Amino acid sequence: MVSLKAIITDHPHEIAAAKAVIFPGVGSFNYAAAVLRDKQLAKALLEVIADGKPFLGICLGMQLLFSQSEEADKIEEPAEGLKVITGEVKRFPATLRVPHVGWNKVNPVSNHPLFEGLTDGAYFYFTHSYYVKPEDNRHTLALTNYGFSFTSAVISNNLFGVQFHPEKSGPAGLRLLSNFGKIIADQD
């Protein structure tokens, strides 16, 4: 297991200077996007991503990487994200129980170091009402089925995002976070 020094911060200069970023998120897309803009955090996050530093978005932290979301105060106007990955964040259809809460299988679409040592169909913990829909399927790193197959992990160079919560997913989640640590260590 890789040992890393972590800091929790909302200071743009600390984020921009970081060796890597884990960007968690819980809550409303448009409120979080507004906070990122107001606190000058969006610029720092985009700088980390542009510099090719390892980046892991978790749940809303992944959704905010997309162009826009249906989750908005004004339904007729989609909320804008960081636009790192072209695509949108969509609400699960009314035919499904929302939010999607509990354990579900994650199926990587290819071998990748982020999922090293995990079995195909490993269980992770989810709690969300919206899912990402990348415009380009090359950004899909893993799929999950909840009434239909949706993207549950994304990739773009050294940027990764997961819809599930690895921090709440027991041994599988710890393994994924350890794998992300190895990706960081390999950057040295």
Image (tube, grey):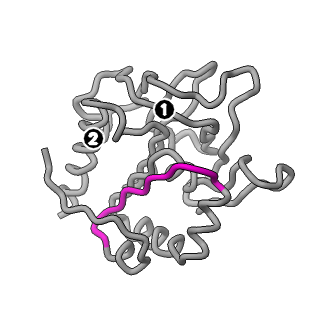
Q: Residue at x 46, y 68 (%)?
A: 45
Indicate the position of residue 88 as horizontal and vertical percent values. Answer: 67, 47
**Residue 20 forms part of the magenta stretch:** yes
- Quadrant in which the N terminus appears: top left
Labels 1, 2: front one = 1
Amino acid beneath label 2: Pro
Amino acid beneath label 1: Phe
Measured Cα–Cα span from mark 1 to mark 2: 21 Å
The residue identified by callout 1 is 126
In the displayed structure image, the side of residue 173 where residue 12 appears, left or right: right
* Residue lying at the far right of the rendered structure: 76
Rendering quarter of residue 7: bottom left
Q: Residue at x 37, y 69 (%)?
A: 9
The residue identified by callout 2 is 113
In the displayed structure image, the side of residue 136 where residue 114 appears, left or right: left
Q: Which residues are magenta?
A: 18-29
